[in-house]
Image (spheres, rainbow, N blue to C red):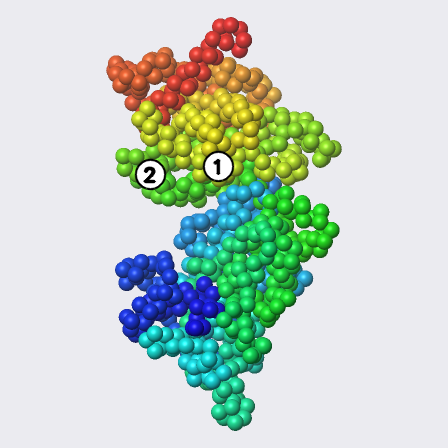
Amino acid sequence: MKLVPLYLGTFALTLLCMTVATNGAVAMAAIDQSKSACGNLLIDEKDMAVADQAEMKALTEQHSLLDLVSADPAKNLAAQHPSIVMNAYQRNLAMILSMGEQTIPNPDMPGGTIKYYNYFEKAGPETGGRMIVGQYEAKEKWVQYLKKGAVGDKSGRTLLVYTGPAGTGKSEILDLSSSGLKYFTLNHPDFYFYVPVFHDLRKVPSLARYIELDDQGNEPEIPLPYPESPLVLLPESVQKKVVELAAPRVRELTKTEADPVLAPGPMAEALRDAILSYYANLKGSPLTTLEAIQALDKHVTIKRLVLGRGSSAPKIDAKDGDINWRGFFIGENPYFVGDPDPNSPFRYTFTGKLLQGNGSIAYLDEIWRNKRQLRDSLLGIIEGRRVSFEFGPTIPMDVVLVAAANSESEAAVFNEGTSKAQFSRAETMPMRWSTYPHEIIQTALLMNFKQLYMQRLGVANAPIEKADLRKLFPLRTFGRPIQGPDYNYALYIGSGPDRVTISPHALMLMAYLTAATRMNRDVKQAMTKLPNANVPQTEIFQDIVARLQVMTYNREVSNAEWAEFSQLQKLLGDGEFGLDMRDVGNKWLPDAIALAREPENENTLTPRVIREAFVKLTTKSEKVITPDNGARLRWLGWMDRITVDMIANDMRDDVMKAFGSKEGFAHEAYKRVIEELLKQEETQGATPKSQFLRDIEQIYGEVNRQPFRAEKFAFYHTRQVQKNAELGITGQDDVPHPELMRAINSYYARNQARVVSLEMLAKAIGSGEADAKTGEVQDAFMRVMMHELGYKSKRAVQEAVLLVKDAEDKKAQLAREGRL
């Protein structure tokens, strides 16, 4: 019986297999012999020669143990690769800090600031293209958690548990860390990670009986069963000197002092002690420090390990029933259970999933569903950097543990009298679904990112290129209308003949409805949670459209109102219910894209297609994403309301802008109106109104269904100037008031309609036939719609014109009936 298959964990087998497979000095016979131990590889053996060269180089890199104790910083392995003397918290923290951080105004709260970390926001190769959208408080909590663990602060050693519904980004913490560890330990010398591998152990009599030769008569190399630093093999006095040599770079990378786990695991300790004992007996006296290191060097090779791959960043799901200690940590080795040495580490297998995360990170999903005894062991790792059992040796652990739970299981544990102590040793951080529409659509696009393309609007011959989410969704500024792709970029899904053009406002319809389903607008509940609140009695709390306008900063609210509004969102559990983000990103959006590819939709994703996909999705029994039929009907009603009062208004503004574009420049007219209003205010109405302003006032009342109030727009302009000053923004035009801009666009569109009516234009676009005058207007109209506003297909323009025409016809009918 051979030792290797009996006690080596997944990490060790992977290291052994890849070492054998990439070492050119190993005979092909040895490679064939290794296949049974290697099992299925991620890399097909026929393709291994063309695999990524950096990874192949890393896997074949090896060093002497003496390289770790060189006094020359230019040659010392730890000084050159300081990750060796970091603990797992420091390793993860250094990755984040290395990509840069900055303090910026809090986009969710006036007057506040937040830390902005590129690691979470960039979606670059460092994190495998991943990012976490929004969730600023949760991201900052993660960084602070790593900082506590990095400094070894025992008072701060709690288990961080993210709570909330599925699909909020909880597991994305692990995915980012796993991708980051792989990238940095592969590409960045500061993060290179090394492990000891033993060889020639049959020369040590006390170990020889545990190791058999392979079928070719060769003695196998013996990796440790889970990742450990070679530092743990050194004498304590030497460990200290090595740490001191690398400490300055650790301090620079982490802003903390080097604090590695120096205690060896049971197997590393047993092999080390057996080797040293053998050579001390040969000498006939105790070994000196140098002799001890030289003796170990005869049997140890230091090899490079790429973290974040395979099982080195495990995700551990909750298990019902009896605890599988072997699966988590260790178990008895049936082949050596009768070993005459009661302290032999070979009596146990160290193949547990959690052990494989040593040196990196492990994610514990649904932590509170595990049995109390297992939870005690997991929390013990946090508090003491070691784990103990009723049987077997105590194991030092160097792993960042992070957990997730839903609110129900958390409440159940809290109410258990025997588990309250455990709960007190955990630090919970809520992660809810976003109620910011732009964050919702950004997340949905991120889930479908590989096929997403963008094209800058208003730039001649702009190329279609891979989408950059940071350009599509700039960081929002509190109080300024949130910017997204609409009016800035045209979006496409896919390429070639199947490419789908995304019409402006289509994705926002999806985002608006998703946000609406996650909002609690129950006035009674609000007053119970916050008895002295004023906001629940207002339109911005009760009305769904007003609420969405607030969440996109398109409706002015005072700082006091916003603070109360934000407090109520947390108290009422906004984001803990409603449309699941996985349903939105993995079902609704893909279904809508597929529907857009149907012939009748001409590869165009419009608001109508978005609604149709939702209707079909919620009526399929196998894809139900609504709690019940009542919720389904209620959500469809909200979608229709949002379409009429938000999407149609935005599309009407687009059509009016394009239709009237030949008559002048609406933004210049806006400035002209504001200047005249400010003059009116200054002279207390003594200055005569221009005919232009009188016309705008009349049209404003018709298109916005409310009277024109000059003081409203003067105040809005003054407030915009104040906000720009507070934010240090200079040389930037004010954001136009949307209602006033709507009236100005309509003014120019009416002038254009004296030449060609909107009905004539709609017919010309649909038929492709037009007289000279209509054709001239149509060309100008299409140019603005397609190149400035992003309606990149004829189908998108047609649907926008028809929607606006229907709205105009309904208004005319209401006017004739005296109901407008």
| Residue at (42% x, 66% y) in the render | 13
Of 540 and 755, the residue lying toward us: 540
Give amino acid for label 1: Asp
As drawn, the label of residue 494 is 2
**Residue density around tag 2, few if under 14, some if 14–19, many if 20 or more, within 10 Å:** some
Query: What is the secondary structure assignment of the residue under circle 1?
Result: helix
Give amino acid for label 2: Gly
The location of residue 77, given as percent across then percent down, is: 44, 74
**Residue density around tag 1, few if under 14, some if 14–19, many if 20 or more, within 10 Å:** some
Q: Is residue 251 in view from this perspective? A: no
Of 651 and 731, the residue lying toward us: 651
Q: Is residue 542 above or below residue 362?
A: above
Left/right placement of residue 369 relative to residue 452 reads right
| Residue at (51% x, 24% y) in the render | 636
The location of residue 307, given as percent across then percent down, is: 45, 62
Asked whether disc 2 touches disc 1, contact meaning CB atoms under 8 Å apart, the reply is no
As drawn, the label of residue 807 is none
Res 364 quadrant in image: bottom right
For the residues carrying marks 2 and 1, which lies nearer the camera in this image? 1
Residue identifier under label 1: 583
Q: Is residue 336 above or below residue 306?
A: below
Of 640 and 385, the residue lying toward us: 385
The location of residue 794, given as percent across then percent down, is: 32, 25
Query: What is the secondary structure assignment of the residue under circle 2?
Result: loop
Q: Is residue 182 in view from this perspective? A: yes
Q: Is residue 628 above or below residue 107?
A: above
Quarter of the image with the N terminus in it = bottom left
